[in-house]
Every structure is written in structure tokens, then in C-alpha cells.
Image: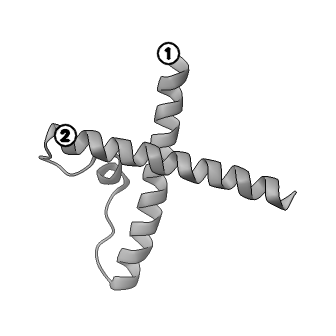
Amino acid sequence: MIDSIIGSVFFEFVGALTKWVVYAVLHKVRGREIISFKEMWDGRKGSQKSEIIMHGFSNILLGLIVVVGLFVLVIKLT
């Protein structure tokens, strides 16, 4: 059980970090204010519970895709 919790937090962190980097670059290019990592991690303030759950799930799914993609890339390059 603790393994799945740790894995979930790891994948959510990787997903949120990936989203934050992409959004930071896009906002910088467009001249907008860069959003904080905390906002990317927690979601928008005042969101409904279902939106918060979907936001967390999308971070986990994106993190899983990024980690698996990096593993595949490393295996292909070696």
C-alpha cells in the first residue's frame, strides 16, 4: 500500500513538473506572468472536488507517460 502511495506522489510530481515547465515556457514566450508550481500541483483555488481529483489524476497520468517514455528512449539509445 505504501508503495502505491509513494509511486502516486512520484508520478504526480513528475506530471506537475512537466506541465509547469511547458506552461512556463509558453507563458514566457507570450509575455504573460508565469504561474507558480504550487498552483500547478494543487490546481486552481476554489475548484470543486471533482475538478481537484481530475487535476491530480491528469498529473499522475502525465507523469507515468513521461517516465515510461524516458525509459523507452533510454533503452532505444543503448
Would you name the residue on which mark 2 appears?
Answer: 50
Mark 2 is surrounded, within 10 Å at the Cα level, by few (under 14), some (14 to 19) or many (20 or more) other residues, namely: few
**Image quadrant assignment for residue 42:** top left
Kindly identify the residue that appears in the image at 40 percent across and 69 percent down.
Answer: 24
Q: Is residue 49 above or below residue 14?
A: above
Q: Which residue is mark 1?
A: 1
Mark closest to the chain's N terminus, 1 or 2: 1
Give the residue at x 29% y 73%. Answer: 33
From what the image shows, is residue 74 above or below residue 50? below
Q: Looking at numbered disc 1 in the image, what kind of residue is underneath it?
A: Met
Q: Nearer the viewer, residue 78 or 10?
A: 78
In the figure, is residue 55 to the left or right of 50? right
**Given contact means CB atoms under 8 Å apart, are the residues at marks 1 and 2 in contact?**
no
> Going by the image, does 39 lie left or right of 65?
left
Q: Amino acid at mark 2?
A: Ser
- Badge 1: residue crowd in 10 Å (few <14, some 14–19, many ≥20): few
Q: Position of residue 61 (x, y in %)?
A: 45, 46
Where residue 74 appears, as percent x and y from the top left, is: 77, 55
Please state which of residues 54 and 17 is positioned toward the viewer in this rendering: 54
Q: State how far apart marks 1 and 2 are (Cα).
A: 24 Å
Give the percent coordinates (x, y) of residue 40.
34, 53
